[in-house]
Amino acid sequence: MLADNISVQDARKLVLVSQGLHKTNAFGLGLKGVLNSLQQLSYIQIDTISVIERAHHHSLWNRVNNYSADLLEQLVAQKQVFEYWSHAAAYLPMGDYRYSLYRKQAIAGGDIHWHHKDPTLTQQIIERIRQEGPLQSKDFERPSGAKAAGWWDWKPAKKALEQLFMEGELMAVKRQGFQKVYDLTERALPEGVDTSVPSEQEFYRYLITRCLKANGLANAGEIAYLRKGIKRKLELVCLEMLENGELQQLECQGQLYYTLAHSQNSLKQNIKGGQVKILSPFDNLLIQRKRMQDLFDFDYQIECYVPEPKRQYGYFSLPLLWGSQFAGRMDAKIERKTGLLLIQHLHIETPKIAEFIQDLLPVLREFLLFNQGTTLVLKRLSAPNALSEQSIKTGRQVIENLSNN
């Protein structure tokens, strides 16, 4: 079966429409918009870094204009959203709950996630939660005389709680101070949720359809991202789905991708011109860096894990999407006590500096409010050497005027 050729411009469009980043409020407003976003994307990654608003809130803010953190908390409380593991810690729509059981069953059967199981301790924890109700890790004391060496030095009870969470015995019913509150799964699940464990074939079909719905197009390696040992079997399922017409194959710049049948109908939609999105490093669009380089010619690395002397753009540089291209990155930090949003480094990668900055300004205002800031300060602005110093100077003045207003 021959693959259809698709231009890189159309490939980008297919991706951005699927991700809901092509226009304002692609998935609606309020609670419905947040739930629709999760159902389309299949997950939103949770991350601990909080130099600005956390990644899960940031990614949803980019898709739901009136987003606030309490909307996600409401959906968790209403049991429409649950927390588990996708390729990383994530919020997922409750409609996908049964597919989490495939991994939970494997871990309960002996697959190691992080920790070895302590049967005695886990049973004690289950009994306490059964009798006392939802509990946090801090409700279980560290052994006498033991001290924590850091967030990575989990006490035995925390390890046991996480093991039970990964096995599916416990669920996180909410977070307090960003710490999970655990309850028995039997009490945490809504009535009527499907708890049948999918077969291997069903699970692979789920991974394929979910990935392609959210991302527009992907190859088998991207669909199997960070899931060890499944690429070969998953590829066979893709070929079966291709043969029976559920998938199509596309070729872009010499690379082959799968897409859902009829997904190219979304190419009829337009990408909003002049729209800038300040993205989280953990946004669903960006999480596979090689894919971003292949499809968007954007070489991105989060530098919080890079030694400071080797950083090019900053500790937590945020990719700046302008229409269907990446036009720069911005290292930002919110000082919560003072309300100061500090742009430590704004690096512009398009020659259209003035046009880009004019489109960036209204989004910067919204980003300031989203982070509950009151003042914005720009420390450094840079652009490729070929661009004129006058353009950079003018851009700096425009942003500083925003800071003063």
Image: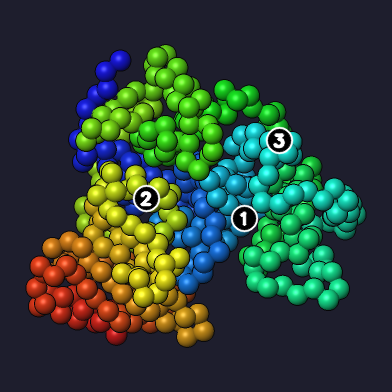
Q: Amino acid at mark 3?
A: Gln
Q: Nearer the viewer, mark 3 or mark 1?
A: 3
Q: Earlier in the sequence, mark 3 or mark 1?
A: 1
Residue pointed to by mark 3: 105
Q: Amino acid at mark 2?
A: Arg
Q: Earlier in the sequence, mark 1 or mark 2?
A: 1
Q: Nearer the viewer, mark 1 or mark 2?
A: 2
The picture places residue 281, in percent across and down from the top left corner, at 41, 59
Q: Secondary structure at mark 3?
A: helix
Pointer 3 local density, CA inside 10 Å: few below 14, some 14–19, many at least 20 = some
Pointer 2 local density, CA inside 10 Å: few below 14, some 14–19, many at least 20 = some
Pointer 1 local density, CA inside 10 Å: few below 14, some 14–19, many at least 20 = some
Residue 289's disc is 2
The picture places residue 248, in percent across and down from the top left corner, at 34, 23
- Residue at x 27% of width, y 22% of height: 3
The picture places residue 121, in percent across and down from the top left corner, at 86, 54
Q: Secondary structure at mark 1?
A: helix
